Amino acid sequence: MTKAEDFDMAAAKNALEVLVLAYEEECWKPTKGTMITPTPFRAAKDIGIKSPKQIYREDIIERPIIGALRLAIREVGEYLWQNTKSTRAMLDVLEEVASRHPDKESCILGIADGAWDGLGEGGDIWCG
């Protein structure tokens, strides 16, 4: 876990912004005259007993850039959770980042929402 004094909220927001925009761009990049349809995030409960890390590794093998971006977005979510212990604080960060791009706001919200599914603990779990 990161020490509280090392927590950098601004850096987390910037990282999240760069990653979700790159993910969105990569998903819609034309290839051979067609658009890539984003694959839905797969919840661990839908795959069996695999951990989210195992699922993301499989995504990286199937679609390396998109899978790596997905994993990095989840890591930012884990960083925010470890340092705030609040899904409400995570949502505040996500909404701030999304509001910077009104034309892509719903896409940004959806990307991080799916990647952060299951983060948290106890009664405070992110449900994407």
Image: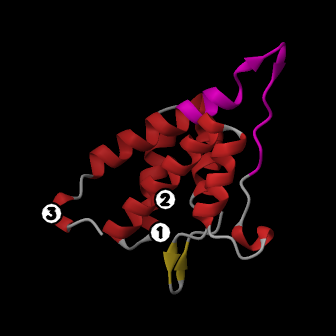
Residue position marked by numbered label 1 in the rendering: 87
Residue 48, position in %: x, y? 77, 74
Label 2: which secondary element:
helix
Q: Is residue 9 above or below residue 124?
A: above
**Near-viewer residue (113 or 74):** 74
As shown in the figure, which amino acid type bears the numbered disc 1? Thr
Seen at 57% across and 51% down, the residue is 112
Residue 108, position in %: x, y? 59, 41
As shown in the figure, which amino acid type bears the numbered disc 2? Leu
Instruction: Check whether the beta carbons of the residues at disc 2 and disc 1 lie within 8 A of each other.
Output: yes
As shown in the figure, which amino acid type bears the numbered disc 3? Glu
Residue position marked by numbered label 3 in the rendering: 5
Q: Is residue 127 above or below residue 10?
A: below
Please identify the quarter of the rendering in which residue 89 is found.
bottom left
Mark 2–mark 1 distance (CA, rounded to whole Å): 6 Å
Tell whether 3 sits left or right of 126: left
Tell me where the magenta segment starts and ends, as one range: 22-40
Label 1: which secondary element:
helix
Tell whether 82 sits left or right of 72: left
Residue position marked by numbered label 2 in the rendering: 91
Quadrant placement of the N terminus: bottom left
How many numbered discs sit on the rendered protein? Answer: 3
